[in-house]
Image (tube, coloured by chain):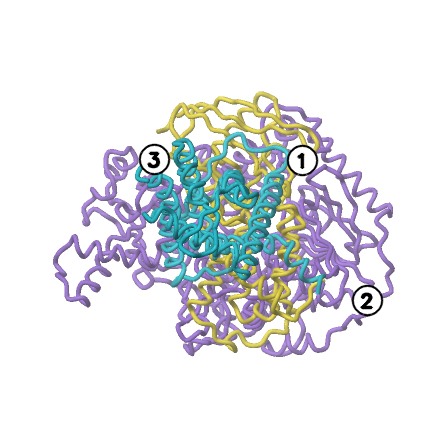
Chain colours: A purple, B yellow, C cyan
Amino acid sequence: MTGPEFKPAIDEYTLYIRITIKNMSLNGNVPPGPLGDKWTKYRSSMPLVAPNNKRRIEVIIVGTGLAGGAAAATLGELGYKVKVFTFHDSPRRAHSIAAQGGINAAKNYQNDGDSIYRLFYDTIKGGDYRSRESNVHRLAEVSVNIIDQAVAQGVPFAREYGGLLANRSFGGVQVSRTFYARGQTGQQLLLGAYQSLSRQVSLGNVTMYNRHEMVDLVIKDGKARGIITRNLLNGEIERHAAHAVVLGTGGYGNVFYLSTNAMNSNSSAAWRTVKRGAYMANPCYCQIHPTCIPVSGEYQSKLTLMSESLRNDGRVWVPKKLEDAKAIREGRMTGLDIAEDDRDYYLERRYPAFGNLVPRDVASRAAKVACDEGLGVSPSGLAVFLDFNAAIMRYGKSVAHSRGLNESDDKLVKKLGTEVIEEKYGNLFEMYEKITGENPYVRPMKIYPAIHYTMGGLWVDYNLQTNIPGLFATGEANFSDHGANRLGASALMQGLADGYFVLPYTIGTFLANEIRTPMIDADAPEFMQAEKDVKDRIDRLFAVKGKQSVESFHRRLGKIMWDYCGMSRNAEGLIKARKLIQELRDEFYRDVFVPGSNDEYNQELEKALRVADFLELGELMTVDALDRNESCGGHFREEYQTEEGEALRRDDEYAYVSAWEWNEGNPTLHKEDLIFENVELKTRSYK
Amino acid sequence: MDNMTLTLKLWRQKNANSKGAFETHTLAGVSEHMSFLEMLDVLNEQIINEGKEPFAFEHDCREGICGTCSLMINGYAHGPQQGTTTCQLHMRHFNDGDTVTIEPWRSQAFPVVKDLVVNRDAFDRIIQAGGYVSINTGQAQDGNAIAIEKEQAAGAFDAATCIGCGACVAACPNASAMLFTAAKVSHLAQLPQGEVEAAKRAQKMVAQHDQEGFGRCSNITACEAECPKGISVAHIARLNREYISASLGSETQVN
Amino acid sequence: MVNWFSRFITSSIGQKIIMSLTGLFLITFLLVHLIGNLQLMSSDGGQSFNEYAYFMTHNPLIKTVSYGLYAFILLHAIQGIVLWRRNSSARGSVGYAVKKDRVAGDNSRVSSVYMGALGTVILIFILIHMYQFWLQMKLGNTEMITYGDGEPVKDLYTLVSAAYDNVLFVVFYVVSMIFIAFHLWHGFQSAFQTLGLNHPKWTPLIKTVGKIYSVAVPVGFAAIPIYMHFFQ
């Protein structure tokens, strides 16, 4: 919501939106040729590094999730000398582990008309036509290899009675192409990558540095040649050199403080490279997931996702009358007291064709609209109902019918229907009850949207190389494949595609020219300087000796981001937010309190370093959101909507990737024009 | 209840080499809707606002899957509620006026790093000893080339669901990591892809388990009782089977 | 050969297998021992028991087995003590201030957690028991008795009967049997679990047999001193 009191004059606008725009399109280095042949041809003709040379080439990988872990394992197998870093105590903790639903692949095992092209098309369309065609097609091509690879690693995917792999449909697509391992697909895939990585560690091809956080990037002669890390156990600042650096460090959803990301997920590794000149692409594209458990109080530390699959059977509603909503908020009534006629099943009303199954961005915004109107149903006013009663009765009737029982006995029907729901979603209902203490079989669930994934990230070319030679970004850390909105079950696919099947090839295009480069010296002046910069930064934080906790700053930043750069944005609010963030940053460096010292295990210092970076990244997000005068995917600008309140995309002016150079707070925009040769740009409609 | 007051006895230890002791704090205003870790967040915020050092404890996803959180709460690994990690334990399971004792995992193989944080690297080394299928990227045949019985795949999944939190070690009166080791051996042994190396894997992983200083399993089943994922000791029996046949029957020598 | 075998047998699982196999042997022995000892309750003044004892101490096969038995008792005890010590040190230098043990399913918390302590008590019982009867018999501190025209045999019956006149011994034996019952309650099914014999179809049967066994055998043993004290 915007603060209505803030009306910037034109000069104020220019003051806060001081940006430079470069109009020459960035080069994505997309290989020539027809879409379907690009990758195959490119892969077969790219320069290779001979095995004897691979042994002499060192690669640093930061992050051990699906993208980083898979890349580290594969590069180790190929014979490179790999050093892999994670701030976790073990590579297996990376947040990829929390993905529930599944992983897409164009296997067409179900013979339902799926194909690489269809997966490509769905992903481009789902991303609201803001991604690079060539990258997305490559993603669809390698998706099939991922499943084979995972099965061979021993990932226990769900199977049919015949022993073949099972699929389900996910996220509103028309084919069943999602492979899954109960509700723990991310965990199983990550453990597969972790096991492969562990094998390489045991073989000595990969050196594992756990509890090491990347705190800076080292550039030497214009190329990324190493990183500075902080050993989280003892605070030691270490210099690590290599021929190339790969980031697989995930997204920046935690800039919002409350998100479905893990508590320690952060943007610092990526942001440090931005501080050294890498471009941040489309930072305003944030995915908001509609079915999360609502905030219960000020102490809330994170939000828990309830799988999207619940919307297959749940009906979303709020009371029609404001006084009913108020009574529910104050605990005088419950959802059960509201008569059928007094309920507004707003998704079914607004989107009759897709109903409760509209894509994530649409469902999220609709919930916000309802709550903004004062119809929210939790004490905070920020929740809507997800009701399974209709499904329970429907299933119950059908079971009663098939067993020849009395279909008009409501109690019996309800019992039978509850059993069906329990079988389908039992673990999710149990989790809901664990967290909220309410029984969702009896009372409708309360849900609210929450930040879940960030489509933006480091700008990379077709080789996954950033604008800094030798610096690569994979998985959620790069911007490349999901455009402005990611489809369900696509994050796992992209992380593993990058890690197993793309980067290990494309990094060769850079490394093939490095075979004559001797081992990089970690004592070179550039490393010493970067190390000093880090130490100064840490000293500066301790020197503040203020009064407020790091957490309190993070919470305040999150609120600014959510209020002004969240589910819907407008120019006024974004300008205000940028100013508020700048002020908050100043206050942070004036009044933050970081207890303890550097030379010990110090979680507050870890947080302080991360929040300091969020305080800059958040600002860039507002700048990007303000520049993009259109609504697309996860970016909804109130000024750009149709008469029915739907997103209004402006392809003529904004079919480009915004790649931002940070320039210490004076961002420069570099554009990469998106050229669509194979798909026709259409308006997404779910009416 | 929205306003509980708790007496918290927490383990305070500066680093691995120093001696630790309990520190007692009173925390008021605890809401039943808080998760246990959110309650600790509030305590830490209170301590920081007094200008002191907060308690270090590990946590990450806070949705019960990453395995980072730990804590011995009133004598139970991950607290009194079974099948639940500490991060998903909520304060509605406590009462106003309760005293809550919070300790780190205790095991020779899990040295304390600081306060409530322990080092679980031993688990990584057990996996590195053989908890994988030796296949390189790109070598795989089609995913549907080998049919696997649905129940068998589900059985493998039941073992693979281990989150590596260490509650089995913490709860085991013998501080044994057999359930952890067995979960990986059993997961892979039940799948044709993993069966190929089963003999070598069982021997190497058990050897590493022993070398790390974990205790010996005596089938108490405390591990299963406290495992947040409810992994069954039946997997330990499978490990034993695998180990016996690998050591005595298989021609595979492991050095 | 030595290399792989010693590695196997000294591994954590190998050590447990020693416990399991020796335990199963001892379990079997208990039943044999009980069946023989039930003759103490026959009202023939001890003839059948004494003749049985003579047979058991003179049959070369049984003599060999009995030496095996002594060895297995020792092995079971020593290996148990080694494991117990190993396991207590695995907790590390600092233990828990508060620790509650919970076990899964129908496992018994007391008998599984305190297996080592129970075993220690039982070992002491065995030492006393063997001193009292076996050693006295071996040292020849028993009267000889001749039945019919057979060889003179040691009158072990009188030795036992005399001991059970003392109510304190009766209590001692009965209490010891309770310890054995607890030890067996866990030990019986645990031996199978250690050998990897855990099967959804068979394990419930093993557990049921184990429970019946671990109650019936000690009750049978305990009945002897009680019967002899009160009725003979």
Vertical side of B213 occupied by B129: above or below: below
Query: Which one is in front, A38 or B46?
Result: B46
Q: Amino acid at mark 3?
A: Pro
Asked which secondary structure carries label 2, the reply is helix
Q: Position of residue A30 (x, y in %)?
A: 66, 70
Q: Which chain's residue wears label 2?
A: A
Have a look at marks 1 and 2 and say if they share a chain.
Answer: yes
Q: Earlier in the sequence, mark 1 or mark 2?
A: 2
User: Are the two marked residues, 2 and 3, in contact with CB atoms closer than 8 angstroms?
Assistant: no
Instruction: Please report the residue visible at 57 percent of the width from the left and 50 percent of the height from the top.
Output: C70
Cα distance, mark 3 to mark 1?
39 Å
- Asked if residue A608 lies left or right of residue A331, the reply is right
Q: Earlier in the sequence, mark 2 or mark 3?
A: 3
Looking at the rendered structure, the secondary structure element under dot 3 is: loop
Residue underneath mark 2: A513
Whether tag 3 and tag 1 are in contact, CB under 8 A, the answer is no
Q: Which mark is residue A417?
A: none
Gap between marks 2 and 3, in whole Å?
Answer: 61 Å
Could you say which quadrant of the image residue A200 lies in?
bottom right
Residue C157 drawn above or below residue A597: below
Between C175 and C108, the residue placed more toward the observer is C175
Q: Locate residue A307 relative to residue A556 in the image: left or right.
A: left
Q: Quadrant of residue C10?
A: bottom right
Q: Tell if the residue under mark 2 belongs to the same chain as the one under mark 3.
A: yes
Which residue corresponds to mark 1? Answer: A601
Q: Are marks 1 and 2 in contact (CB under 8 Å)?
A: no
- Residue identified by numbered label 3: A379
